[in-house]
């Protein structure tokens, strides 16, 4: 490869206190209305959309790199605090399209869980809190859940070719939900999904 064809090194800034990526190139936003079908209490989600003017649920900021093997994609994921009925705000969750790809989540701010599941239904939860790094192994679908009262912010890194498969989680959900019960987060077996 000619030297002029090489990708050029670069640096970015992340405010480690707030967890904000400065000058991201791309920010994807998910609003409450993007979460239809994910929460157990559907009327509560509709009330949230109506009464709070379809608030931002979470966003992902990145400076993308080419989605080719050898590159590392990375982003800041910011999940707002809140409840849909009894259920804590969460991300949609996905498998990676390339199943052999893992992901690192370094939590910069907030409190919550990383829920993970396999195709055969094994389910694990790892606590997230500032300074905790969660390793999501290959083949595990993953979803973050914010159980605190401030944004849950993570720095994520994964192989750039991973791709995202949302469809399977949309259909099958996770075997567990994180609910607020007696004022505390509890992992509860999910009833039939959707
Ligand atoms: C993360 C997630 C981010 C948003 O960057 O994409 O937390 O969650 P959803 O993608 O499930 O909506 C990641 O796991 N990337 O692979
Ligand atoms: Zn992922």
Image (cartoon, grey):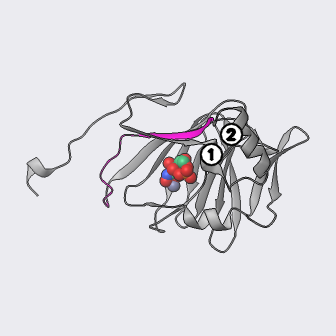
The verdict on residue 127 being magenta is no
**Residue 104 visible:** no
Instruction: Sort mark 1 into few (<14), some (14-19) or many (20+) by Cα contacts within 10 Å.
Output: some
**Residue 75 visible:** yes
Report the disc number at residue 49. 2
Relative to 102, is 61 above or below?
above
In the picture provided, is 184 more to the left or to the right than 118? right
Asked whether mark 2 lies closer than 8 Å to ligand 1, one says no
Instruction: Sort mark 2 into few (<14), some (14-19) or many (20+) by Cα contacts within 10 Å.
Output: some
- The magenta region covers 55-69
Report the disc number at residue 48. none
At horizontal 77% and vertical 54% (from top left) the residue drawn is 40
Query: How far across and down, in percent of the image, does residue 21 sit?
Result: 44, 31
Q: Which residue is mark 1?
A: 33
In the picture provided, is 116 more to the left or to the right than 28? right
At horizontal 75% and vertical 40% (from top left) the residue drawn is 47
In the picture provided, is 85 more to the left or to the right than 154? right
**Do tag 2 and tag 1 residues touch (Cβ < 8 Å)?**
yes
Label 2 sits on a secondary structure element that is helix
């Amino acid at each position: 490869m000619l030297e002029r064809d090489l990708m050029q090194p670069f640096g970015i800034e992340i405010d480690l206190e707030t967890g904000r990526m400065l000058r991201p190139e791309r920010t994807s936003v998910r609003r409450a209305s993007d979460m239809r079908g994910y929460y157990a209490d559907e009327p509560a989600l509709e009330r949230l959309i109506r009464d709070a003017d379809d608030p931002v649920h979470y966003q992902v900021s990145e400076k993308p790199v080419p989605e080719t093997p050898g590159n590392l994609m990375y982003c800041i994921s910011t999940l707002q605090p809140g409840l849909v009925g009894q259920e804590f705000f969460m991300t949609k969750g996905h498998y990676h399209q390339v199943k052999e790809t893992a992901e690192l989540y370094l939590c910069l701010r907030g409190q919550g869980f990383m829920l993970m599941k396999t195709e055969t239904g094994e389910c694990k939860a790892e606590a997230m809190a500032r300074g905790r790094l969660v390793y999501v192994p290959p083949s595990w679908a993953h979803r973050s859940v914010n159980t605190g009262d401030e944004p849950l912010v993570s720095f994520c890194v994964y192989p750039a070719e991973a791709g995202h498969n949302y469809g399977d989680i949309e259909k099958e959900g996770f075997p567990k939900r994180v609910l607020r019960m007696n004022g505390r987060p509890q992992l509860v077996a999910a009833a039939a999904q959707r």
